[in-house]
Amino acid sequence: MSASAALPDPASSAPGPSCVLGVDRSVLGQPWRWRALAADARDGLGMDDLVTQLLLSRGCPPDALERHRVPSLRGFMPDPSVFRDMDRAAARLADAVDRQEAVAVFGDYDVDGATSTALLVLVLRQLGLSPRAYIPDRLSEGYGPTAAAMRRLADEGASLIVTVDCGAQAHEALAAARDHPVDVLVVDHHKCSASLPHAHALVNPNRLDQDAAGAEHGHLAAVGMCFLLGAALLRELRARGRFADRAEPRLLDLLDLVALGTVADVAQLRGLNRAFVTQGLKVMARGGNTGLAALVEASRLGRAPGAADLGFALGPRINAGGRVGRSDLGVRLLTAACPDEARELAAELDRLNGERRLIEGHVQEAAEALAMVGADAGRRVAVVAGQGWHPGVIGIVAGRLKEKLNRPALVIALDEVGMGKGSGRSVPGVDLGGAVLAAREAGLLVAGGGHAMAAGLTVASGGVAALADFLEDRLAAAVDRAAEGRALLLDAVVAPRGVSRSLVDAMEAGGPYGAGWPAPRVAAGPVRIVRADVVGRGHVRCTAMGDDGSRLKAVAFRAADTPLGQALMGAGPNRRLWLAGRAKLDDWGAKPAAELHVEDAAWADRLA
């Protein structure tokens, strides 16, 4: 750790009103606090060790530090049998392998669905089957299994259908499948109602009847559950003697898919998920998946991907097929064996991602205008709807709106026949998926479901106002509690010259970071802004100088029209600021250099 970095003082880390650097109201109107550490967690652990601090402050038990430093599957993976119906699902899949049955894998059109589908397809291929991958069209079919799709797959000869990242609420579709000679396995992670759809097996850690050993893994993405099903399947086939005279598939080689789906679905990176992503990034760096290697090349990363790249570079390109192109492009890429085909698919997804960005920009501008004016502007849950908005980008726009407003946001695209497709994103502590499920059970929705941080729904255009009122009534108190506890949490304070490559490297050792395991945040300063300008899509780029003359590169993304951006551009060389954000490496140049990605600022002169 850099000698200029300061760790939390035990007294100021204790619960209470004390603020880091005395900042009780920043330019964004929030206090700065240390990320909390219990006093007994610090005793005897040498808190000069930055990685130890990072692990403890993110909930790692003191007696499990070594297990969390380098998360491994051996250290975190449960026995797959702890999940209800897992053994039944594995046995049915094993029967399909033994009998060489026609199997169809039905997945969602997002990254979690694509990686889940690809993982099972690749495993079953290695076991001698030729599984059919089916991804519904977002616009014409919508989310999840439909009765028509189940009948079509059965008529085409499938005797077993596995739905992945969907199916937990597909009562009608699975009832239709029951009328045909086809079995259905559901592998999902979305919230379940008390009544489950009929299936040969339904594997979901969020089943209401799941016991504690399985329920503690409710944060897994669907692709993680598919990996566990793959492990259970291979164990079942091993017990049947299938691998006595033939090679067993290497399930660990598919961890790159698990990492990609987990991060892109914003699953919490704790426990098993951190192990999945840590080990999956190692697999991805070897370039064994032909399609993923082509996608990394098309993304112009120029290096092995990190955890953030999965969410911001690779994931959006996989998603682009389902949003504005053909929904099966992502699965075709991830299961491609021919390098030439993979490069063509990756190039097409890269092109579609550029098209998606343009569409997204128009919808985002309109959605923000609706959310920030009029009678509904003060609602705790932002619900906006627009005629002709592209349903493929509403989830991204909902996420942007949530970030800007610091409250849950639901964006609904209304079509010409009076129906709306909605996608929502929430803030920590506010269970949006549960509220959407309750709205469906109350008869306000045609369809709907999700998890705590994200949800999707279908609603009649005439029911949007009633839905907004329902969500406001149900979630207002939770949103208020989340707002009251809102603060910028810091892990260290550094001098401007302390934002260095050595600091970045030390902090990265506590990763991978993501939802539920937040990337470290530092405060740097005090500094004077010697140059600031707007670049790209509203980003504020600036050069700051410390009192000792050291210089610091900083950028505040999408901040030009916010109080933060205005403060950075208006400070000038005569005012001093503390800057808070993430220390990162700018690796676009010939020599990577550290910079600060600014998330907030506070006037240092006023705090003297």
Image: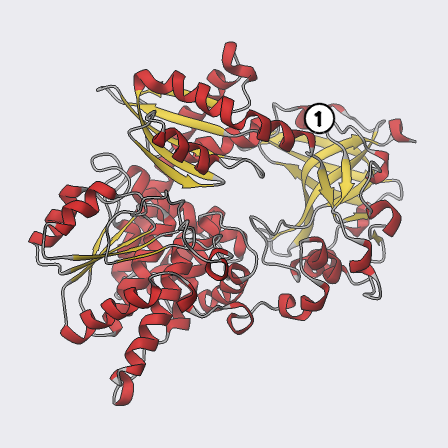
Q: What residue does disc 1 label?
A: 569
Q: Residue at x 14, y 57 (%)?
A: 182
Above or below for 444 versus 110? above
For residue 244, what is the image quadrant? bottom left
Q: Residue at x 31, y 71 (%)?
A: 233
- Rendering coords of residue 217 (x, y %): 49, 57
Q: Nearer the viewer, residue 257 or 483?
A: 483
Q: Is residue 280 left or right of residue 128?
A: right
Above or below for 176 versus 432? below
- Rendering coords of residue 524 (x, y %): 79, 43
Q: Is residue 177 left or right of residue 314?
A: left
Can residue 129 be seen here? The reply is yes
Q: Is residue 28 left or right of residue 379?
A: right
- Disc 1 marks a residue whose amino acid type is Met
Q: Secondary structure at mark 1?
A: helix
Q: Residue at x 32, y 52 (%)?
A: 114
**What is the count of numbered marks?**
1
